[in-house]
Image (spheres, coloured by chain):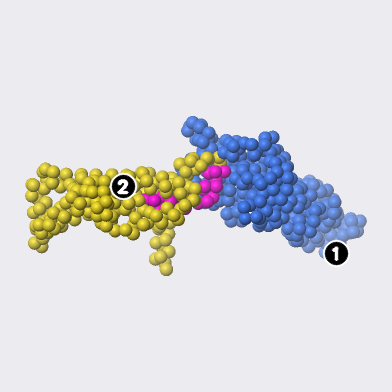
Chain colours: A yellow, B blue
């Protein structure tokens, strides 16, 4: 309970709400790292995922390469990139992007590949060209999975961006790294709490965006399928 | 309208799906491609809109060399209906139907108006316009598929097992509606099915294909059933060829036998004489307006003076001009005296259809 009181005291200290080390400033920094990394990851993973899914060529290769990023510990990547490229935002960005790519790439590829063959056949048979099939059919139908990938990556990146503080950058990780250094555990807990809250907020915002960009026809079909699956499992 | 000249399709794995096919689909007719699996019927259909590229041969669509037209342009002029509709799950019924109009750059309002017209044409209730495919029944989905294919009024329609995914009752209804629709729109239709009964019901002409895409026979359903070209065709048509032929013909196409008919005023003796003249042991009794009173065997009449006063037997089934001869046969085998009584629209007696009439019809 002592820690809890200390954490409350930390949050109510006016020093946390003013200046370059304030909670709002650290929050903006943190969000900046996460947003930049996620956007770069989307710019890389989305076109590759769409292309590989649309053509059906090189899918296994792309997914395996992407998953290598998932297997390597992100802290290790940050240290490695810092060692190779020096201190700065770029190494952190590279590590976070490598970490954010796999879910987006895999989901985009799986989503586009998973479009019902008869639906794709109908689109082509009605005279859609390749890019029109992609734009009017494959992307919208794959959108629930694509968005799920973006959400997974975003939340992971928000959590992992904490590591940016180790090579000397800012963000909410600063509180944790500094707190550990001076054994101020209230600050460590406060930092961790802020990261968790930010991750939840990002997830909520992206879920709202998903409702906007996913067709009602798919959302309801998926909801129906989920309800049916629940009923089946209850029955069993 | 669609002409195949020596068209062959070999797939990269070496299988030959279609072998030197010559086929002419006349304008405004329904040509059904039917055959066992592996007979290349779907491949043949898909070559028309170049979803499958022929390996060799020539293909003309609407007088133009189809192999020299950009595939996407060729396809926009050919309606395409596939099993279960192939509807876009993320689009409403209206947006599914207006797919091709929007590809062609129609204004939204014009496209929506067209969608409403088409929904009415294919028998879809206007309330489903804003629904998504997963909210529709199988039959409704199939109707949307047909409406979507007709959106820009293409002269040609390709239908690949369009009713394969619905239950038999819905299928029969969709077939009937498709025939009614076709009578209205007069498209040139290539229709693929594996079901010979569907082929007979839907086709103006039927192409029976054998494994490897070999055309065994191309003829009208009646010709096919009357004169199958070879054992394969006969076998494919099945054992009930005679019944299928009868189902294609209407009662109005044969002349009914007047039958041993007497008036309600006739006596038992009169009835005996008429029956003897016709070589039967029964008579049909009609009143002055030629409405059927009933029928009776001669020996149950006794010595009645006026047949109209007796309690006569009623036929279990009647047939009318628009019924099929198959229905007449059914009435015959359900009748104790082996004939089908034919009635007119006002219920007047028009004679009987006999076994001899049906046999003569099948022997023609």
Q: Secondary structure at mark 2?
A: helix
> Residue A114 in the image: x percent, y percent?
47, 53
Task: Judge whether residue A172 is colored magenta.
Answer: no
Residue at image coords 73%, 58%: B236
Which residue in the structure is indicated by mark 2?
Answer: A38
Quarter assignment of residue B237: bottom right
Q: Residues within 10 Å of mark 1 (few under 14, many from 20)?
A: few
Circle on res. B299: 1
Residue at image coords 46%, 53%: A59
| Count of number-bearing discs | 2
> Residue B33 in the image: x percent, y percent?
69, 49
Q: Nearer the viewer, residue B33 or B109?
A: B33
Identify the main secondary structure in magenta: helix
Circle on res. A94: none
> Residue B55 in the image: x percent, y percent?
66, 46
> Residue A120 in the image: x percent, y percent?
52, 47
Q: Nearer the viewer, residue A128 or B260?
A: A128
Span highlighted in magenta in the image: A104-125
Mark 2 and mark 1, same subunit?
no
> How many angstroms separate mark 2 from mark 1 (CA)?
99 Å
Mark 2 — on which chain does it sit? Answer: A
Residue at image coords 69%, 45%: B56
Q: Nearer the viewer, residue A142 or A61?
A: A61
Residue at image coords 10%, 62%: A1
Using the rendered image of the protein, determine whether residue B241 is visible from the camera's viewpoint. Answer: no
Q: Residues within 10 Å of mark 2 (few under 14, many from 20)?
A: many
Q: Is residue B325 above or below residue B148?
A: below
User: Going by the image, does A185 lie left or right of B110?
Assistant: left
Looking at the figure, which quarter contains the C terminus of chain A?
Answer: bottom left
Front tag of 2 and 1: 2
Task: Judge whether residue A123 is colored magenta.
Answer: yes
In the picture as drawn, the residue positioned furthest to the front comes out as A84
């Amino acid at each position: 309970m002592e820690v809890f009181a200390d954490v409350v005291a930390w949050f109510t200290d006016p020093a946390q709400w003013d200046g370059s080390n304030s909670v709002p400033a650290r929050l903006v920094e943190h969000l900046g790292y996460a947003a930049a990394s996620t956007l770069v990851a989307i710019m890389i993973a989305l076109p590759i995922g769409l292309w590989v899914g649309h053509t059906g060529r090189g899918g296994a290769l792309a997914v395996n390469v992407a998953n290598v990023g998932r297997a390597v510990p992100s802290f290790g990547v940050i240290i490695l990139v810092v060692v190779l490229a020096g201190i700065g935002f770029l190494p952190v960005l590279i590590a976070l992007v490598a970490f954010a790519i796999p879910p987006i790439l895999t989901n985009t590829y799986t989503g586009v590949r998973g479009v019902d063959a008869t639906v794709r056949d109908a689109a082509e048979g009605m005279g859609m060209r390749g890019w029109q099939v992609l734009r009017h059919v494959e992307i919208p139908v794959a959108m629930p999975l694509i968005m799920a990938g973006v959400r997974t990556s975003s939340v992971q990146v928000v959590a992992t961006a904490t590591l940016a503080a180790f090579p000397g950058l800012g963000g909410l990780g600063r509180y944790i790294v500094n707190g550990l250094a001076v054994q101020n555990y209230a600050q460590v807990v406060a930092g961790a709490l802020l990261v968790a809250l930010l991750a939840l907020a990002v997830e909520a915002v992206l879920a709202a965006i998903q409702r906007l960009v996913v067709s009602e026809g798919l959302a309801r079909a998926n909801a129906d399928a989920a309800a049916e699956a629940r009923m089946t499992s209850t029955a069993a | 309208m669609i002409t195949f000249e020596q068209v062959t399709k070999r797939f990269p794995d070496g299988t030959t799906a279609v072998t030197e096919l010559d086929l002419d689909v006349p304008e405004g007719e329904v040509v059904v491609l039917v055959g066992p699996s592996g007979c290349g019927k779907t491949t043949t259909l898909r070559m028309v809109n170049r979803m499958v590229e022929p390996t060799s041969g020539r293909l003309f669509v609407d007088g133009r060399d189809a192999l020299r037209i950009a595939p996407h342009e060729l396809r926009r002029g050919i309606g395409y209906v596939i099993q279960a509709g192939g509807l876009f799950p993320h689009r409403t019924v209206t947006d599914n139907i207006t797919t091709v109009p929007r590809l062609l750059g129609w204004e939204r309002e014009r496209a929506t108006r067209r969608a409403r017209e088409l929904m009415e044409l294919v028998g879809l209730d206007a309330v489903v316009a804003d629904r998504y495919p997963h909210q529709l029944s199988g039959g409704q989905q199939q109707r949307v598929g047909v409406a979507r294919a007709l959106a820009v009024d293409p002269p040609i329609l390709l239908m690949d097992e369009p009713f394969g995914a619905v239950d038999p009752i819905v299928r029969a209804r969709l077939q009937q509606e498709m025939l009614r629709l076709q009578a209205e729109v007069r498209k040139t239709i290539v229709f693929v099915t594996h079901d010979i009964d569907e082929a007979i019901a839907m086709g103006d002409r039927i192409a029976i294909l054998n494994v490897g895409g070999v055309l065994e026979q191309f003829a009208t359903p009646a010709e096919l059933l009357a004169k199958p070209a070879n054992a394969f065709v006969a076998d494919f048509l099945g054992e009930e060829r005679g019944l299928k032929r009868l189902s294609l013909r209407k009662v109005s196409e044969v002349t009914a036998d007047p039958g041993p008919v007497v008036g309600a005023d006739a006596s038992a003796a009169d009835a005996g004489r008429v029956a003897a003249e016709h070589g039967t042991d029964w008579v049909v009794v009609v009143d002055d307006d030629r409405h059927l009173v009933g029928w009776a065997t001669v020996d149950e009449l006794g010595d009645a003076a006026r047949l109209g006063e007796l309690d006569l037997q009623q036929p279990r089934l009647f047939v009318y001009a628009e019924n099929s001869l198959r229905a007449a046969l059914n009435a015959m085998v359900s009748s104790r005296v082996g004939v089908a009584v034919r009635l007119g629209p006002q219920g007047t007696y028009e004679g009987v259809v006999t076994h001899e009439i049906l046999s003569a019809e099948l022997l023609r």
